[in-house]
Amino acid sequence: MHKKEYSMKRGRKLSYYSNAGSSISNSNNNNDNNNIGNDNTNKKQKIIENNGTVNKKDIERQVKDEQQYIQHRYGAFKNYYMFNPTEERTKFIDTEDVLNLIFQQHSGKKSNKLQCCDVGCNSGELTLELYNIFSKVDSNKKIEMYGIDMDQDLISMAKENDVNNICKFKTLNIMKENLDGKHHYDLITCFGLTMWIHINHGDKGLKDFLDKLTSKTNTLIIEPHQWKSYRKASKRLRKCKKSGTFEELNNILYRGENVFKYIDETIKNKGFKNVKFAGETKWKRKIFVYKRA
Ligand SMILES: C[S@@+](CC[C@H](N)C(=O)[O-])C[C@H]1O[C@@H](n2cnc3c(N)ncnc32)[C@H](O)[C@@H]1O
């Protein structure tokens, strides 16, 4: 086990409007073009404008419903690591084989640092664990770890969890913005995100997303969802108090077994090889390492 250099603030209760987890202004459509979370919108004011009345209980209920909806729409779960502990993934990364692949430089390139980006980092707990794993591999290498997520509240939580400021966390919607232009990362990790991109942005969105990642790295670690997760996510969204549907779901052509094939082929089409099956999590999600050939 690695010494944890950050505080684990799990299971905290979110207060209404200071940490509401969603943008009320986007509440009735499938618009995730913008970041979500505690943005400039004064959520309370927005609800009052919409309703024309001030009722604290109503406001609290609406904000709670909206929070729930956003979590189930984008996978922006505030207590994610309570039900999917970091160890479920780190145990497959903290192995000699996988670490060798990560630290193996592309085309003999020598560098004294390893720059990594964890895409869809949620509240940063897995990102921070990865930092700890990588930093014990080679004391001569400086690890630069970035975590990005579209949810501002999750990024605030990640910054709070990172008590020693060892990583850099940033709010960024990968479907709308580019990863920091000046960086070519030695490693990009993408855990538990492909379905949220696919289900909200369709086949084309998933391809654009993967193309974006592969254009920014020579090593990609990815944990795609299985098709059954799509069905479960859809059911959960319908059951939300503020019920919704994934409008793109019916248009998806690459479904069932073809989800993984589509992801695999899209990455390979960009000159990558699937070099390692790292392991399968308790949720039957497979973790793969791809390297530029
Ligand atoms: C289910 S969580 C996975 C968290 C983490 N990667 C892990 O596996 O432990 C998916 C995360 O992706 C984020 N996300 C979804 N769509 C995104 C987008 N377009 N850009 C950036 N982050 C996104 C969500 O906010 C959420 O925190």
Image: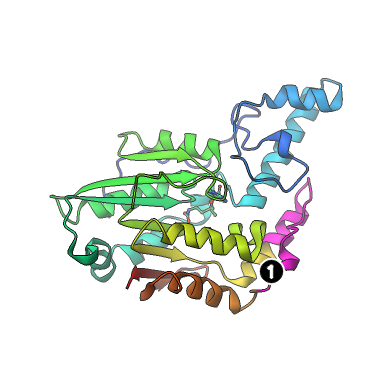
- In this view, the residue in front, 135 or 170, is 170
Scheme of image coloration: rainbow
Residue 85: percent from the left, percent from the top?
45, 55
Q: Secondary structure at mark 1?
A: loop
Q: Answer left or right for 210 relative to 87.
A: right
- Can residue 25 be seen here? yes
User: What segment carries the magenta color?
Assistant: 233-253
Q: Quadrant of the C terminus?
A: bottom left
Residue at (28, 49) in percent of width and height? 132
Residue 104: percent from the left, percent from the top?
22, 65
Q: Quadrant of the N terminus?
A: bottom left
- In this view, the residue in front, 270 or 88, is 270
Q: Answer left or right for 198 relative to 93.
A: right
Tally the numbered discs: 1
- Can residue 277 be seen here? no
Residue farthest to the left? 140
Residue at (50, 71) in percent of width and height? 266
Q: Which residue is mark 1?
A: 252
Does residue 244 belong to the magenta stretch? yes
- In this view, the residue in front, 255 or 15, is 255
Does residue 216 belong to the magenta stretch? no
Q: Answer left or right for 15 relative to 214.
A: right
Residue 5: percent from the left, percent from the top?
30, 41
Q: Answer left or right for 102 relative to 35.
A: left
Q: Quadrant of residue 31?
A: top right
Q: Quadrant of residue 251?
A: bottom right
The amino acid sitting under disc 1 is: Ile
Asked if 166 appears above or below 245 in the picture, the reply is above
Residue 42: percent from the left, percent from the top?
67, 24
Asked if 42 appears above or below 102 in the picture, the reply is above
Residue at (49, 75) in percent of width and height? 265
